[in-house]
Every structure is written in structure tokens, then in C-alpha cells.
């Protein structure tokens, strides 16, 4: 299947399969490509590539359970979902969470969350206004 992605992101993970399944479930992305080091998830012309952290670096990282949000990163990805409440249930079932407080923008509402490894992301639900 040809790659028609116009935009995307690469996210590094200690547990490749767990993180890939998290985003696949929470964002309803389609898995098209997978190998021992990568999983490529697609939605329209957007691609999210989950990339395994190289073993020498991975050996120096310890994750907590539940995950400790890694808030000191200079980038936060956002995704639009049909329902924040459904995404919260899916996130919790896959080892992550949506944080309880959000905010409203012009035509959408927002909640931040973290995946099973503590990576912070933002989800948006359209409200029909704006």
C-alpha cells in the first residue's frame, strides 16, 4: 500500500507494541506497517510512527507505573477525536490517561493526557461552534 502521508510524527518508545496499541486504540489509527523497530499508524494523510528506542539508550530509562507525565519536553502532539469521553476510557484501558481538566477553544474542547510511557499529548473534540 503506497504511503500518501502529507504530515506525521515520530514517537520513540521503550515498549514498541504497547505504545503502538495505545495510539491505535485511542486515536482509531490504522496499522499498515510494522517490524521489530517501527509501527506505522495512519489516519487519512497523517502518519504516526512509533519507533523503538535503541537498546543502549533504553537500558538507561526506567518507567514508573502508573506513568509519570514527562512535562519537560518542548513539543506536544494534538489529535482530533470524535469523543473525549470515549478516548478517556480507551486511554485508561491501555495504560494511559486523559487528565480531568480541560479547556474550550473556538469550536472544540480539549484535554491533555499521557500515554503508557508518560508522553504528553492533547486530544480535541469538535463542538460544532466556531
Image (cartoon, rainbow, N blue to C red):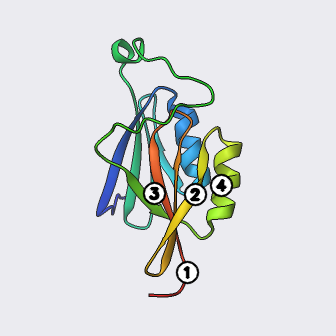
Identify residue for label 2. Answer: 101
Image spot of residue 31 (x, y percent): 52, 50
Q: Are marks 4 and 1 in contact (CB under 8 Å)?
A: no
Indicate which label's residue lies in the foreground, 3 or 2.
Answer: 2
Image spot of residue 86 (x, y percent): 68, 61
Above or below, 42 against 69 in this view is: below
> Mark 2: few, some, or many residues within 10 Å (few <14, many ≥20)?
few
Q: Quadrant of the C terminus?
A: bottom left
Q: Left or right: where does residue 50 sit relative to residue 5?
A: right
Above or below, 78 against 9 in this view is: below
Q: Earlier in the sequence, mark 1 or mark 3?
A: 3
Q: Are marks 2 and 4 in contact (CB under 8 Å)?
A: no
Identify residue for label 4. Answer: 88
Could you say which disc has been placed on residue 42 in the image? 3
Q: Earlier in the sequence, mark 1 or mark 2?
A: 2
Above or below, 44 against 30 in this view is: below
Q: Are marks 1 and 2 in contact (CB under 8 Å)?
A: no
> Mark 1: few, some, or many residues within 10 Å (few <14, many ≥20)?
some
Q: Earlier in the sequence, mark 4 or mark 3?
A: 3
Tell me what residue is drawn at x 53 percent, y 56 percent: 30
Q: Are marks 3 and 2 in contact (CB under 8 Å)?
A: no
Tell me what residue is drawn at x 30 percent, y 60 percent: 7
Q: Are marks 4 and 3 in contact (CB under 8 Å)?
A: no
Q: Earlier in the sequence, mark 2 or mark 4?
A: 4
Indicate which label's residue lies in the foreground, 4 or 3.
Answer: 4
Could you say which disc has been placed on residue 127 in the image? 1
Amino acid at each position: 500500500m503506497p504511503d500518501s502521508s502529507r504530515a506525521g510524527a515520530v514517537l520513540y518508545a521503550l515498549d514498541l507494541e504497547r505504545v503502538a496499541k495505545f495510539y491505535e486504540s485511542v486515536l482509531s489509527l490504522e496499522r499498515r506497517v510494522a517490524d521489530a523497530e517501527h509501527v506505522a499508524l495512519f489516519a487519512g494523510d497523517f502518519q504516526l510512527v512509533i519507533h523503538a528506542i535503541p537498546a543502549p539508550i533504553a537500558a538507561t530509562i526506567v518507567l514508573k507505573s502508573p506513568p509519570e507525565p514527562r512535562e519537560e519536553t518542548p513539543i506536544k502532539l494534538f489529535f482530533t477525536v470524535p469523543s473525549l469521553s470515549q478516548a478517556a476510557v480507551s486511554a485508561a484501558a491501555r495504560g494511559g490517561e486523559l487528565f480531568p481538566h480541560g479547556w474550550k477553544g473556538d469550536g472544540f474542547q480539549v484535554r491533555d493526557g499521557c500515554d503508557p510511557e508518560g508522553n504528553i499529548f492533547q486530544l480535541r473534540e469538535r463542538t460544532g461552534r466556531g
